[in-house]
Image (cartoon, rainbow, N blue to C red):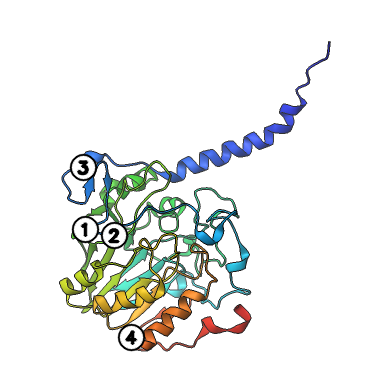
Amino acid sequence: MKKRYKYPLIALSPILLAAAVFGIEFYRNIGKLPDESRFARLPYYQNGAFRNIYTAPELPYYPERATGKGGFIRDDSYVPKGRLPMHTLDKNSFGQAEAFAYYWLGHASAILELGGQRILIDPVFDNASPVSLPIIVPRFQEAPISRENLPHIDAVLISHDHYDHLEAATVRHLADKAARFIVPLGVSDRLQSWGVPSEKITELGWGDAAELNGVKITAETAQHYSARWRTDRNKTLWASFVLEGAGRRLYWSGDTGYGPHFADIGKKYGGFDTAFLEIDAANAGWPQTHMFPEQSVQAALDLGAKRMVPMHWGVFSLGRNPWYVSIDKAVKTAAHKNLPLDVPKMGEKYRPDSFRNDGWWTRKELR
């Protein structure tokens, strides 16, 4: 009779341990879901989920150009050949928050100073993934500042709960440091499960506003969706934002497809000094949940914006386009439409009155 040896179990134990570790990490990064009864009377909440005002198609899990690899697995054929030019920041880079200044941190993350308030928008410093595997939605460039080196933050503003906009590790780090968190409906439950006190959180539905020491922040419509796993799609809201302070009116698109909502918002507010608009991650597989760059420029015109600053590009290869395609198209289209478009580097202090484009994204060694 043959003996049964336990050595195969010993060989498998590291794999099982790794699976357990990643499983725990994944679970901790999803966050808690809200009580659905809170939203039952909202016109844009039906059958247990938030919905777009304008119809948006279901989003496939794999972009059309990523056949066989999966849409969010590392593929270096889309990334820059070298590091993009960047201004490195730390706490000493910031003094008192100014009337208006903007620091792009890459993709859709930014520090916005308005009316003497410092607002951190959609802060993501690691890969846009629920687990720390370097092949899943990896960055192709580090952020210009680490979460540990952030200056004092008066408010953290979140547009929606996707991993490239809402990072659990950063929320946990800022839970006892940031003075306030302003989020769309339902996202507060995720934040509380990561340690943010409920009294620090302000939830906004579309059309709701919050006051931040003289700065008014209003959540407006966007055409997108939410999810941190396959079973929680549209259980929390997504939003764009209008920020008003120090005599300026700004628009932050968050993630959105192109639609009539831009003209509606432009008419409602009478135009904007600057519109920060997403230009990348569009793919033919999801034509109404992200914008192609030509649509982003048209959105700025619909909003009545005096100038446009592109965001949601330069860090992740989500739409499976070469990294420079979207910015090239946005710049070309804006020039044709006579729309001023400013392209600051990551970490660069941006003020529209003194900014001049230097074409850094066109450098041949990066393509």
Place of residue 302 in the rendered image (x, y in percent of width and height, measured from the top left): 25, 76
Q: Give the side of residue 193 with respect to residue 203, left or right.
A: right
Q: Position of residue 351 (x, y in %)?
A: 36, 83
Residue that numbered label 3 is attached to? 38
Mark 4 or mark 3: whose residue is earlier in sequence: 3
- Kind of residue at disc 4: Leu
> Crowdedness of circle 2 by 10 Å Cα count: few (<14), some, many (20+)?
many
* Nearest the eye: 212 or 270: 270
Comes first in the chain, label 2 or label 4: 2
Which quadrant holds the N terminus?
top right
Tags 1 and 2 touching, CB below 8 Å: yes
Q: Which residue is mark 4?
A: 339
**Residue 277 in which image quadrant:** bottom left
Q: Callout 2, which amino acid?
A: Ala
Residue reaching furthest to the top: 1
N-terminal of the pair, mark 1 or mark 3, is 3
Within the image, what quadrant is residue 267 found in? bottom left
Q: Determine which residue is flagged by label 2.
A: 239
Helix, strand or loop for disc 2: loop
Note whether residue 96 is visible. Answer: no
- As measured in the structure, the alpha-carbon distance from the residue carrying label 4 to the one carrying label 1 is 28 Å
Q: Amino acid at mark 3?
A: Arg
Task: Give the mark, 1 or 2, whose residue is nearer the N terminus.
Answer: 1
Report, in whole angstroms, how far the alpha carbon at label 1 lies from the one at label 2. Answer: 7 Å
Q: CA distance from mark 4 to mark 3?
A: 42 Å
Which is nearer the eye, 289 or 254? 289
| Label disc, if present, on residue 206 of the rendered structure | 1
